[in-house]
């Protein structure tokens, strides 16, 4: 918590005093901030942003504004079964898949303003080298046990089935499509042996059990110290972090695992894509992705350090001379990654013996979309790269909305109507309105020159103090990873400014007490400058735009928040320009229609009808016909009365295609006709066959067009 003390007078400089209790690593020399490595098997959506990437970016920007030494690490997770499954589905190689999505996601992060120090990838040679070295060092310390167990095997493809290569019924919620590592419906962590009626996701066949050997991490050996570390922040009596700063849902989930009894977990897999296990007898085996991926944080830091003249070990290891940690390690993740970052990776770090443990794992819950869970497989998502293409001028607005609904302690929901309301009613009506009035009036009354203030009234002092106290609370919220609360505090400064102008009414006083107006406008300008500081971590582009509008040439840092000496008298500000524009209904309608279209795209196909034999099929006599006459059947909406030439014979056919085609559209069409269908009277007309049509998911009919090789009417279709 940072408390600014400001002496009397608007132009005084402030002194900063820290009143936070002294805790472990209260003043670390360095910060290592990681954001969960996204799988490079698909694009990013808003749930990814709200879960890990936006909160971590906000926090890092806050640290940098406090002049902290911080490295911000992320990159593509390019190994594991999810990648190979996508490659098989797309008919491409795993490398082609990861190259495609690494490029898409890296650019999307950059365009959205996520300011990573490095965005690396786990397929890089330097990562493979570090991951193998890390594994060998752990293996030399007897961290793993080698076990031979039975594992599911796909006989058709001659392949052992890793977690995501097998699916079946979840034993906890009966979801028929649970995977071998997790049920995405109820969120339960599973193992392949837990599944009921398992099947291979490659062939669809029932797998068999076959023996294979793997290196396991016996997590049960670590329950005692993990419990002390999670609940008390201590290991062997040494205070490492403040457990009260951890989120309840993080501590709760970790302790539920520990209390249920930790079990050995395989750290290797039978796959041909990934980091090869660097041991004899390990042919065809790779490191488990949850051993491989977190080491990606370390290999990325090493790469960044090499490129920037730094020592990567300063950001990951304890001081070799004192044995003390001098860096804070903080993992930003979604709740589905809590166990891996709070149990498995800490075990590996501690077993290595030289690495710091996480100071905090501020995991967020899930973001839902328009009343439903975000789903990549169902395309129920707002994709980041598509949003950036459609609305490149509304990047900070999305950052604001996502932060204001960030699922910090429970699941939250994004809707396009709420997006519109928050931008129009908060950014435009409160923040933008206040700044615009201040800049317009300053240019109108003083030709854009900041006036010299006269006497400060008691009411002015109350406003100044209110902004100071709000600034303190914002800082406290940022330190506690409560970014929604901090953003609300930033907007409260704009509310304070609006109320101050409304109560002071400088547009009226300018005629009767122009000296008083100078003080009012000077204070209003200082509040505007405070907004530039407060919003910088959340909306960096808009904050910079506001700085430029106010004529601020020196970059503001966090210690400036709460100061009323940010803009000096006689400074020339610039002309007003709108920070935000209203969101019209058209945008909401367009985006909702887009989602509805994606829902239609994912409507499951009608069940396939009962099987027929080949002999049944040969009974069908399908011929090429040409429609020579057509008219609507009276008093019906769907029926057309057709005359069809099927090779020297004109057949009368009644067809239910009138909602898709007009009579004029079908005359002259070549069509496929089932000619040996028993005649049937329809609306008093004897129909002597059937036109074959296809129907898509939206119910739109189209002709089953014959091949160009059969242009003559009467030819059979085979």
Image (cartoon, helix red, strand yellow):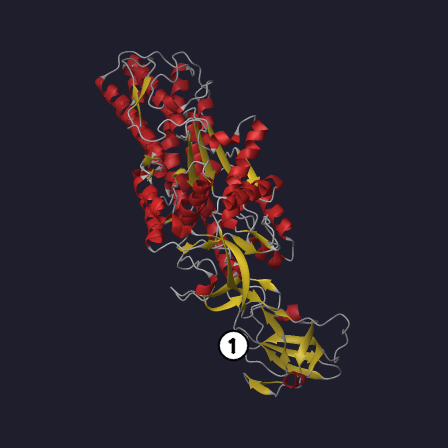
Q: Which quadrant does the N terminus fall into?
A: top left
- In the image, residue 87 above or below residue 718: above
**Relative to residue 561, is residue 586 drawn left or right?**
right
Q: Position of residue 408 (x, y in %)?
A: 36, 43
Can residue 384 be seen at all in this image of the molecule? no
| Residue 203 visible to an observer of this rendering | yes
Quarter of the C terminus within the rendering: bottom right
Could you say which is closer to the camera, residue 417 or residue 166?
166
Check disc 1: other Cα within 10 Å, few if <14, some if 14-19, many if 20+: few
Residue 705 location (% of width, % of height): 68, 71
Residue at the bottom extreme, as displayed: 678
Say which of 622 and 488 sits in front.
488
Which of the 4 image quadrants contains residue 351?
top left
Residue 348 x, y percent position in the rendering: 46, 44
Q: Which residue is drawn at 32% across and 49% down?
A: 252
For residue 669, side relative to residue 136 (left or right): right
Q: Where is residue 38 in the image (x, y as percent from the top left)?
A: 51, 46
Q: Which residue is drawn at 39% across and 45% down?
A: 364
In the foreground, 292 or 376: 292
**Which residue does the image show at 45% across and 53% down from the upper left?**
374
Viewer-closest of 689 and 663: 689
Q: How many marks?
A: 1
- Circle 1 residue: 635
Q: Quick check: 274 above or below 8?
A: below
Compared to residue 91, the image places residue 504 above or below, namely above
């Amino acid at each position: 918590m940072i408390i600014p003390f400001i002496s009397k007078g608007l132009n005084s400089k402030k002194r900063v005093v820290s009143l936070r209790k002294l805790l472990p690593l209260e003043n670390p020399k360095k910060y290592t901030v990681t954001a969960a490595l996204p799988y490079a098997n698909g694009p990013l959506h808003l749930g990814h942003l709200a879960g890990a990437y936006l909160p971590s970016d906000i926090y890092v920007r806050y640290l940098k504004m406090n002049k902290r030494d911080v490295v911000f690490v992320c990159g593509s997770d390019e190994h594991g079964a999810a990648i190979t499954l996508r490659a098989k589905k797309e008919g491409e190689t795993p490398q082609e898949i990861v190259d495609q999505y690494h490029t898409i996601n890296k650019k999307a992060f950059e365009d959205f303003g996520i300011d990573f120090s490095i965005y690396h990838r786990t397929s890089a040679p330097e990562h493979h080298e570090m991951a193998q070295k890390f594994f060998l060092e752990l293996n030399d310390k007897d961290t793993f046990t080698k076990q031979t167990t039975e594992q599911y095997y796909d006989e058709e493809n001659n392949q052992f089935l890793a977690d995501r290569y097998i699916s079946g019924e979840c034993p906890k919620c009966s979801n028929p499509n649970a995977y071998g590592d997790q049920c995405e419906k109820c969120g339960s962590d599973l193992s392949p042996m837990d599944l009921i009626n398992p099947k291979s996701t490659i062939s669809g066949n029932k797998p068999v059990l076959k023996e294979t050997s793997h290196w396991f991490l016996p997590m049960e050996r670590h329950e005692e110290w993990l419990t002390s570390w999670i609940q008390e922040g201590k290991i062997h009596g040494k205070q490492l972090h403040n457990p009260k700063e951890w989120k309840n849902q993080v501590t709760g989930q970790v302790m539920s695992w520990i209390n249920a009894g930790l079990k050995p977990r395989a750290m290797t897999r039978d796959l041909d894509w990934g980091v090869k296990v660097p041991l004899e007898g390990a042919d065809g085996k790779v490191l488990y992705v949850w051993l491989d991926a977190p080491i990606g944080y370390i290999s990325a830091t090493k790469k960044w350090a090499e490129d920037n003249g730094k020592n990567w070990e300063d950001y990951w290891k304890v001081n070799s001379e004192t044995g003390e940690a001098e860096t804070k390690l903080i993992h930003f993740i979604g709740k589905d990654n809590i166990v891996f970052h709070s149990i498995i990776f800490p075990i590996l770090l501690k077993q290595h013996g030289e690495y710091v443990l996480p100071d905090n794992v501020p995991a967020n819950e899930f973001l839902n979309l328009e009343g439903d869970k975000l789903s990549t497989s169902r395309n129920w998502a707002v994709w980041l790269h598509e949003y950036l293409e459609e609305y490149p001028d509304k990047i900070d607005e999305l950052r604001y909305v996502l932060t204001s609904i960030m699922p910090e302690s429970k699941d939250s929901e994004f809707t396009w109507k709420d997006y519109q309301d928050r931008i129009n009613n908060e950014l435009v009506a409160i923040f933008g309105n206040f700044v615009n009035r201040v800049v317009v009036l300053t240019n109108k009354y003083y030709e854009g020159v900041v006036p010299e203030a006269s006497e400060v009234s008691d009411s002015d002092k109350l406003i100044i103090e209110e902004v100071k106290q709000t600034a303190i609370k914002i800082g406290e919220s940022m330190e506690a990873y409560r970014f929604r609360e901090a953003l609300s505090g930033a907007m409260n400064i704009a509310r304070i400014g609006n109320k101050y102008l409304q109560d002071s009414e400088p547009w009226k006083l300018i005629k009767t007490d122009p000296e008083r107006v100078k003080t009012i406008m000077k204070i209003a300008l200082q509040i505007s400058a405070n907004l530039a500081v407060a919003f910088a971590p959340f909306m960096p582009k808009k904050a910079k735009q506001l700085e430029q509008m106010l004529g601020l040439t020196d970059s503001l840092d966090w210690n400036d928040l709460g100061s009323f000496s940010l803009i000096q008298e006689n400074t020339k500000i610039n002309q007003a320009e709108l920070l935000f524009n209203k969101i019209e209904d058209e945008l909401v309608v367009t985006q909702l229609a887009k989602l509805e279209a994606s829902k239609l795209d994912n409507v499951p196909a009608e069940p396939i009808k009962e099987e027929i034999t080949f002999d049944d099929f040969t009974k069908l006599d399908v011929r090429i016909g040409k429609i020579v006459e057509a008219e609507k059947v009276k008093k019906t909406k769907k029926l057309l009365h057709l005359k069809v030439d099927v090779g020297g014979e004109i057949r009368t056919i009644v067809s239910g295609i009138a909602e898709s085609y007009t009579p004029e559209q079908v005359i002259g069409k070549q069509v496929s006709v089932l000619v040996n269908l028993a005649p049937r009277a329809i609306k008093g007309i004897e129909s002597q066959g059937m036109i074959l049509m296809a129907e898509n998911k939206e119910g739109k009919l189209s002709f089953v067009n014959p091949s160009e090789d059969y242009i003559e009417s009467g030819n059979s279709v085979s």
